[in-house]
Image: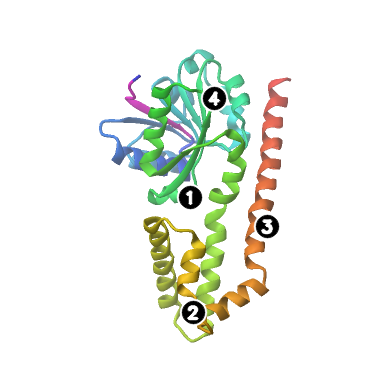
Amino acid sequence: MSMRSVGVLGAGRIGSAIIRALKSCIPNLEIYASGRSEETLSRALRFGAKVSKDNAYVVRNSDLVIVSVKPHHFLDVYNQIPLDFWLGKLVVSVMAGVRLETLSRVLHGAKVFRAMPNINTLVGKSATAIATNNNDSEDRSLVERVFQCFGSVYWVPEEYLDIWTSLVGSGPAFMTEIIDGLVLGAVSSGMTRDIAYKATLDMIEGTVKLLRELGTHPIEIRDEVTTPSGTTIQGLKILESKGIKAGLIEVVETSFRRSREIGVEIDNSIRAKLNR
């Protein structure tokens, strides 16, 4: 199967970032996009998409459809589209919580995938998890090609997606809190915020590159930097006394549980509406 066109249902912030990335990544790809507001449509148009408020128009003209609407709007969008439009279509949902089983039930005859990108899509550095029950290698390759346009792709079992939402989806918020704390510590010690902020970002980027290129465990880098009676061990003692690592573990676990709860609520709500 060739892929000449991609449709984005819901060209909001993430949807628009996807459009912009695809336009620069895959030559001659036609992109169709829908949105609820003129502002959304105008932005998608500016990024190179053919736009419409008619969701059926987007699905009809697209080989692969990315569903990027809010979960509680999903059935409203679905009801606007003739059932036969979904037949044989590659459909990738980036909606939180809507399970593959439910998507397959609703989107009759579609080849269904779920993907979880994050806000780093905006700068082409998302880490996206994709789950599916479709084992067709060509279908999977096409979906992977699309999502590689704005970052890394990880094929995972569906049960990982709630953990992914916690670690990777919410992760940028957790990281920005850590970054802000480090910056404030430097400011408190006498450094200007501007220099502290830029230096912190450079330090984090360098540490990530070091870990990737050396392929070592983070603890090895920690031990390399830590010298007897030095500055690093004094800071590490504070991290230990404050329970920072245990706190981070709890942050991810708690966020994961909430993600799973929300997913069940969303999926049950859609199923209930379908059964009316």
Residue at the extreme bottom: 190
User: Mark 1 falls on what kind of element?
Assistant: helix
Q: Residue at x 55, y 16 (%)?
A: 108
- Seen from the viewer's position, the closer of residues 218 and 40 is 218
- Seen from the viewer's position, the closer of residues 244 and 51 is 244
**Which residues are the magenta region?**
2-9
Compared with 211, 272 (above or below) is: above
Sequence-wise, the earlier of marks 2 and 4 is 4
Residue wearing tag 3: 250
**Structural distance between the alpha carbons of marks 3 and 2:** 29 Å
Q: Residues within 10 Å of mark 1 (few under 14, many from 20)?
A: some
* Residue 84, percent from left and from top: 50, 13
The reply to whether the C-beta atoms of the residues labelled 2 and 4 are less than 8 Å apart is: no
The reply to whether the C-beta atoms of the residues labelled 3 and 4 are less than 8 Å apart is: no
Label 3 or label 2, whichever lies nearer to me, is 2
Sequence-wise, the earlier of marks 3 and 1 is 1
Q: Check disc 3 and give the amino acid type.
A: Glu
Report the side of 122 relative to 256 (left or right): left
Q: How crowded is mark 2: few (under 14 residues within 10 Å), some or many (20 or more)?
A: few
**Structural distance between the alpha carbons of marks 3 and 4:** 31 Å
User: Is residue 7 rendered magenta in the image?
Assistant: yes
Report the side of 52 relative to 36 (left or right): left
Residue wearing tag 2: 227
Q: How crowded is mark 3: few (under 14 residues within 10 Å), some or many (20 or more)?
A: few
User: Mark 3 falls on what kind of element?
Assistant: helix
- Seen from the viewer's position, the closer of residues 232 and 272 is 232
**Structural distance between the alpha carbons of marks 2 and 4:** 50 Å
| Res 62 seen here | no
